[in-house]
Amino acid sequence: MNVYADNAATTKMRADALAAYVETAETLYGNPSSLHTAGQDAKTLLEDCRARIAAVLGAKPKEIYFTSGGSEADNQAILSAAHLGKLRGKMKIVSTAIEHHAVLHTLNKLKKEGYEIVLLPVGSDGIVRLSDVEAALDDNTCLVSVMFANNEIGTLQPVEEIGKLCRERKILFHTDAVQAVGHTAVNVGTIGCDYLALSAHKFGGPKGVGALYARTGAPLYSLIEGGAQERGKRAGTEDLPAVRAMTVALEGSVAALPETEKKLTAMRDRLIEGLEKVPHCALNGDRTKRLAGNVSFCFEGIEGESLLLLLDDRGIRASSGSACTSGSLDPSHVLLAIGRVHDVAHGSLRLTLGADNTMEEVEYMIREIPEVIAYLRNMSPVWRDLQEGRRTFIL
Ligand SMILES: *Cc1c(COP(=O)(O)O)cnc(C)c1O
């Protein structure tokens, strides 16, 4: 059996999005900046897509800027707010310890430029405390950046409440909603954010395209200089096939949301229930305040990487929270933030389900995963030490 359970990393393109991509590339190849009919037809479609994406998010069309993806949208939002902040002598930015690297690395860059960066902790449930956010806000704060849903452990953050705190204090609020858009209801008015980042490939659209919502009046500076595309805020000829496919994928995912969320929640809960029976393990993140498709565990006495490779042999495409694969031995900053010690954080497994997964696949994983864990533990000297009392179990 082949089970793709890494939908938080990227999703397979939806059939309707792929068809829209091909059709647009074939028929509407004009440059939207050209004045002739081919260009103007492309321009009309581009603006139609903008209006449709805006409608889904509860935004105005002119508040939507197409980008190369979630990373660019995060960068542009944060750097724009920081730039205005500096002009006004406000150089403090409040965020959390569990943000995506697109946010954390941007903040790190700003820190080196002299900004004060406050990364709030999260509870062992993987959720930031509203009282911590409130306590961190002051007259020097130019921006708050808190993600809608975490990409590793799926936890949903109290963005509406944070939006309210920011509005009351006239502080700009950015939310990285890359994991949320297309997966749960997202409305910029309800959140009360000034910026919101989304990425097409996380909801059945193509890779390399996304969007930034920037509220009318929120500062926005260009990261890429050149032509006057995107009202001068993002130069470069627009990728119309990708934008159209993103629009179709977004509308399709959102239309199916009630049904998908229900189906995914049932599969997620069954998977959690099945994997919880493995001795010495722990679910990462709150049990219910999490994305419908996210399952994340730590298993004591194993290495996440070995687990991934053996699961891959059995057809299960999963992910670990650890950054070991990217050449670093540091475990995931998210797992450390929820209080997992290094050894435990290394034994992590993330399974992220999508609309294409089935309960049959979930049952397959419930049979295979505990078997592979037992096999790895049997070979592990660390496990023997734990068994024989030379080390103490943490989980
Ligand atoms: C995937 C992801 C990003 C980056 O999006 P790209 O389109 O791949 O650049 C940013 N934030 C979160 C939470 C993500 O999951």
Image: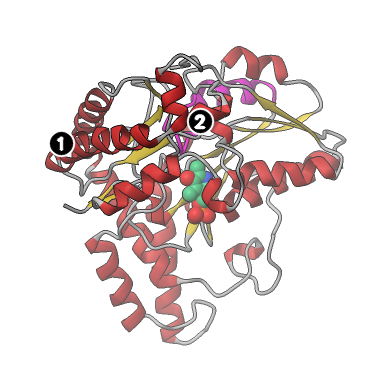
* Residue 10: % across, % down: 39, 53
Residue 114 sits in which quadrant?
top right
Q: Earlier in the sequence, mark 2 or mark 1?
A: 2
* Residue 159: % across, % down: 51, 27
Residue 85 sits in which quadrant?
top right
Q: Amino acid at mark 2?
A: Ala
- Secondary structure category for the residue under label 2: helix
Vertical placement of residue 357 versus 338, above or below: below
Instruction: Tell me, for residue 10, which label it has, or none.
Output: none
- Residue 151 visible, this angle: yes
Q: Is residue 247 left or right of residue 164?
A: left
* Residue 351: % across, % down: 33, 39
Residue furthest out toward the bottom: 36
Which residue is at the front of the view, 290 or 153?
A: 153
Disc 2 target residue = 345
Which segment is the magenta one? 148-170
- Residue 197 visible, this angle: no
Which residue is at the front of the view, 237 or 338?
A: 338
- Determine if the magenta segment contains residue 160: yes
- Secondary structure category for the residue under label 1: helix
Q: Is residue 118 left or right of residue 187?
A: right
Disc 1 target residue = 363
Q: Does the numbered disc 2 mark a residue whose Cβ is under 8 Å from ligand 1?
A: no
